[in-house]
Image (spheres, rainbow, N blue to C red):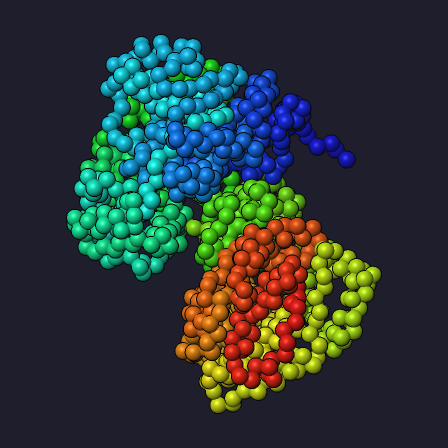
Amino acid sequence: MPHPVTTPEQVLRTDLARALAAEVAGEADFSVTARALNTMDASNYRRVPLGTVAPRDADDVAAALAVCREYGVPVVARGAGTSIAGQATGTGVVLDFTRHMNGLLALDPEARTARVQPGLILDRLRDAAAPHGLTFGPDPSTHNRCTLGGMIGNNSCGSHSVAWGTTADNVHALDVRTYRGTAHHLAPGDWTGAPEGLRDLVHGHLALLRTGYPDLPRRISGYAMDALLPERGADLPRFFCGTEGTLGLLTEATVRLVEAPAARALAVLGYADESAAAEAAPGLLPYAPLTVEGMAADLVPDPRGLPRGGAWLFVETGGATRAEARAGAEALARAADALDSLVVDDPAGQRALWRVREDASGTATRMPDGSEAWPGWEDCAVPPARLGAYLREFRALLAEYGLRGTPYGHFGDGCIHVRIDFDLLTPDGVGRFRRFSEELAALVVRHGGSLSGEHGDGMARAELLPALYGDDLVRLFGDAKDVWDPDGALNPGVLVRPAPLDADLRFAVLPEAPVETAFAYPHDGGDFSAAVRRCVGVAKCRTESVSGPAVMCPSFRATGEEEHSTRGRARLLHEMLAGTRGGLVPEGWRSPEVRDALDLCLSCKGCRSDCPVGVDMATYKAEFLHHHYEGRLRPRAHYALGRLPRWLRLAAPVTPLLNAATRVGPLATAAKYLAGIAPERPIPPLATPAERRRARTTPGRRDGRPVLLFPDTFTTHLTPSVEAAARRVLDDAGLTPLTPKGRVCCGLTYVSTGQLDAARKVQRATLDTLEGEGLLDEGDTTPLTVLEPSCAAALATDLPELNPDDPRAHRLAARVRTFAQTLVGADYQPPRLDRPVTGQTHCHQHAVLDTEADRVLRERAGLTGTLTGGCCGLAGNFGFEQGHYEVSVACAEDQLLPAVAAAPAGAAVVTDGYSCRTQLTQLTDARPRHLAEVLAEGLDDLRTVVPVARPEVPHEG
């Protein structure tokens, strides 16, 4: 056989990886996966690194730099990778500071300072400062995953900058390393920390530095060399902020903290459009608000709860007490010239409103009609007084180019975010992107603005800096770069001597023709590439904790690895699609790297709802597995658990025998091995024929309003007590449940294991059965009540998306109702139980179906308290498969187990999903039940109708 060709880059990569592994205490990872995960940030750009290093400390940074110098390789610093201008990408070695150098080293409440490492997540610092009544002022919308190092590199701001300024306003001292290994301690007024030649460079160009910069609060573009002027105290830390890793690598920072108001209130002011809101914003600044944020109706899918208007200002006020904060907000609302207003002072209500604003960075990537929109002109800024006029001209320029975009952002600072529906897939579209960018830069300059007002220049705008600053000042930036980094090896192509703004676009490597798929991808025009492009890198999936009903991304929270985040998997799929056009994963659907990254995806579907752009990794995983194993042997668990409905039907007559066999240790061990089940998992018992018969023969009225009760596999074969309870409650609600006589199945287990041809066959057989029994007639609106949330979600989404040309699939999907939806729709008043409740909302129900009906039903029954979010970790077949047990338990420990452990005595543990109940049964002493079982307890004849609940079983489907 011929030997594979070894390229010079492969030789360099191999030698470099070996040298770094020998010299660095942290991890050097040059694998395909590590490189793919770092090809992109949250921008339009893609640069392929040679490899990555996760340094353990400043000495490790120095060691990595020494090796890279030896090999002449550039270096790029990276935090959470949420940069929007391409500055967190690079072709050399990426230093990942999030893995080890992520500590809060000291916090001094009296001095109001904190010492931090660059990889520290902002919210960790804010949480540590909060007990002292302090916070870090800048707070980008990515505050729960962005790092302090990234904020310093970009001079990030956030919604509170009208009160507390930019990151540069809140930095006291910095420790940095240059590419040549020199250590510098940067402090205000102390030139001794600067590299030789910087002071002379500044003093030789005082006139240019005094006159060359626009005066506005959000001027982020270029190097802030005016901070080094004598009259400004030669503020080296301020100058270094916003240099985007092009001068030195941050190893430690001392930052200032500000006093956080004890209470806050939020005034939401409605205006006719964003220009009217923008013109009103400067008039609110004399009231000393903490925020003046603006957004238009295009970014709000559901405006319920907001005041009347086509655009809104979110204006926050603070005070020593809740009443004081509210009084300030009410005074501001009275003074504002708004169409309508709303003042909210309860923390939960404010959080809900702020989530609308914070999700805009992702929501804005899709236009109302579903078409794609992109960053690139994400955050230019003008003087606040010019913002209204600027927006009108900006809108006119968009119209001239036939483009669309929805501005939002920091109106009080004159800083606007906008995603624009550029065509970045064709040469003509890219050309128009360039021409528009050049004209928009000129427009910003005419209004006295800055090309970047928050996210930095990176690769997106640096080429246009001469339009803002002129050639002389831009040349001075280059001279400053040479003083700090004479080798030009720190983040080359960014900010100084930049690459063209239309080079290295991440879309260029994707296939031009649609990729053949099994799912229809109706929201992406049937194009799998468009589905994968949904991930723009804002990294909401990288949050370390979730609140409320949120789910995404349980596997990342369990492992802390980018590879196991929704974004990481999307990046690998992107490289897989790129294939031979320059992608890192040329094996396509057969890729082991993509398979391994998807292996720990729980298919919880949390990203479908929690991701601001609706990435649906569960569907992408099923699609990948379908192709990956086509014509090949599958893992044993796919045959055992993926086809579980078939085996349960075959086993139904002999379940007592099988239950007895599973209690024999050697037999259970052998069965688990053959089925690919984790040895740590007990095999739950199956329902006996007698139990199934009792559930189906539960007495009920014959004259009630009919509902179609879907006999899902797991209710029927594993916990028929749930069906019996549901029938009893439906009867009490005046409803008569009808059950298909033939065999039906939603196909979920086949879908979750990627057996999509089999899933489609099962689903079509279900449609044929229902149609043959007259239960699927056109115009029939009888609710299809599904007791298992994952089955309901499969029928509502997977069914029509796998059978897009079958109108029966869409009719059936439209009739799917959860148990609670059916009862609330019937205006049912359940028995009063008056007891606390705990448990978990099923992740599929959260992602696909409505949960409001469940809340209403619990409230009517006097079940007080809320259900937690997150994922139980069992997630159907996932937690039963070999190799998944530890991650499965870690996911349960994230939200579910603590919620149950903290529940008051006598609390009902409600979890409608089989997996959730099984996980709790196996990991705790709790007695989890379906809501139907809990409600049925309140009916007089429950004991004679409903069999005693038994332990639950594996897998949902």
| Residue drawn at the location 35% of the way across and 35% of the way down | 258
| Residue drawn at the location 51% of the way across and 52% of the way down | 552
| Residue drawn at the location 69% of the way across and 56% of the way down | 881
Q: Is residue 201 shown above or below 137?
A: above
Front-most of 377 and 669? 669
- Percent coordinates x, y for residue 290 in the rendering: 29, 41
Front-most of 212 and 680? 680
Q: Could you say which quadrant of the image residue 165 lies in?
A: top left
How many marks the image carries: the answer is: 0
Front-most of 180 and 238? 238
User: Is residue 606 in view?
Assistant: no
- Residue, far right: 666
Front-most of 98 and 878? 98
**Image quarter hosting the N terminus:** top right
- Percent coordinates x, y for residue 773 in the rendering: 56, 83
User: Is residue 13 in view?
Assistant: yes
Q: Is residue 507 shown above or below 481?
A: below
| Residue drawn at the location 49% of the way across and 69% of the way down | 835
